[in-house]
Amino acid sequence: MKNSRIAIFGGGSWATAIAKIFLEKEQEIWWYMRRDDRIEEFRELGHNPAYLTDISFDVSRIHFSSDINLTIQEADVLVLAIPSPYLKSHLQKLTASLTDKVLLSATKGIVADEHMTISEYFHEQYGMPEENILVVSGPSHAEEIALERLTYLTIAGKDQQKAAYLAEKMANHYVLTSVSHDIMGIEYGAVLKNIYAICAGIYYGQKYGDNFHAVLISNAIRETQRFLSAISPGVRNVANSAYLGDLLVTSYSNFSRNRVFGTMIGRGYSVKAAQVEMEMVVEGYYGTKCISEINDRYKVDMPILDAVYRILYEKANARRELKELTKKLN
């Protein structure tokens, strides 16, 4: 993988933060964005016109394109940071072969209507070898990366040499990296933590305090462990930062769009009204339905997930659901 060319896919805050990270060491990157007008604004302003506008880029080091196939052809490593609800629409025009590419997924979601993680989808749908698919995760708000606050990232994949290569590429004075083999566990953990952050936000909107929040998160990490053990048996420590750390930062921080979304629901917003006001993709909303449907097969005891599903998708009374949930936690 020496001298591999890196391409970023996505135009949001997380894609922008990841581009900043790679440009700490890479002389140039390729960057796919769907909208040509955003690309032109980016070139003129020297920053993303819509997200993390405080990050300045040397645009002479970025090869922008709205052509997904051209970007894929030019790169060796494809860094995916497209929100999962929009992934399939971006891939509709895909004709370029992916079999000799390395995919690094930074998308913390499930592929809509497929009930697959990103790694599963690219392996089954596009024939990518499993050893060429990796994921990056960890407690990592894009806003804090923009501010160069210390961040820990985990790169997971079956091929540990590729994982180590990308971990070195992403490591710098404000990003520390580690590697893992648990690609499925980390992918599903990243989806679950968004769901639990919504739940934490709903409770916060209902004026529950820090004491209860701690109980909720204690139960959430145990619920995570039960689900991961059922869907991807193996040795893992869910107390590691890629699991528990990501859950904590997403459920406590005001940078977390999932927590903010949940808080709005707790304060009485409808789901639709909260989505409109957020103006950003809330991965946990879509993840709740996907994980609930996946768990129909596994029958894991997941009272927090079930409560959030009923509130978001069955219009259950949030106050009543939360009250009932408190009786099931310990």
Image (cartoon, rainbow, N blue to C red):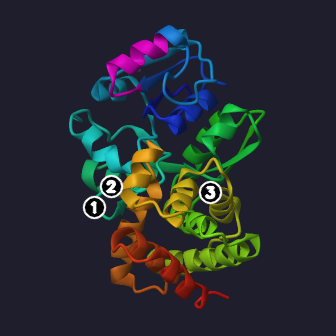
The magenta stretch spans which residues? 32-43
Q: Nearer the viewer, residue 38 or 158?
A: 38
Q: Quadrant of residue 297?
A: bottom left
Q: Residue furthest front?
A: 268
Q: What residue is shown at x 63% (from left), y 53% (from top)?
A: 138
Magenta span dominant secondary structure: helix
User: Regarding mark 1 in the picture, which secondary structure is present there?
Assistant: loop
The reply to whether residue 185 is in sight is no
The location of residue 58, given as percent across then percent down, is 59, 12
Residue under circle 3?
250
Image location (x, y in percent) of residue 246? 64, 58
Q: Earlier in the sequence, mark 1 or mark 3?
A: 1
Discs 1/3, front: 3
As shown in the figure, which amino acid type bears the numbered disc 1?
A: Glu
Question: CA gap, disc 2 to disc 3?
Answer: 25 Å
Residue 174 is situated, as x and y percent measured from the top left of the image, at 76, 36
What label does residue 114 carry, if any? 1
Q: Name the kind of residue labelled 3 in the image.
A: Thr
- Is residue 107 visible in the rendered image? The answer is yes
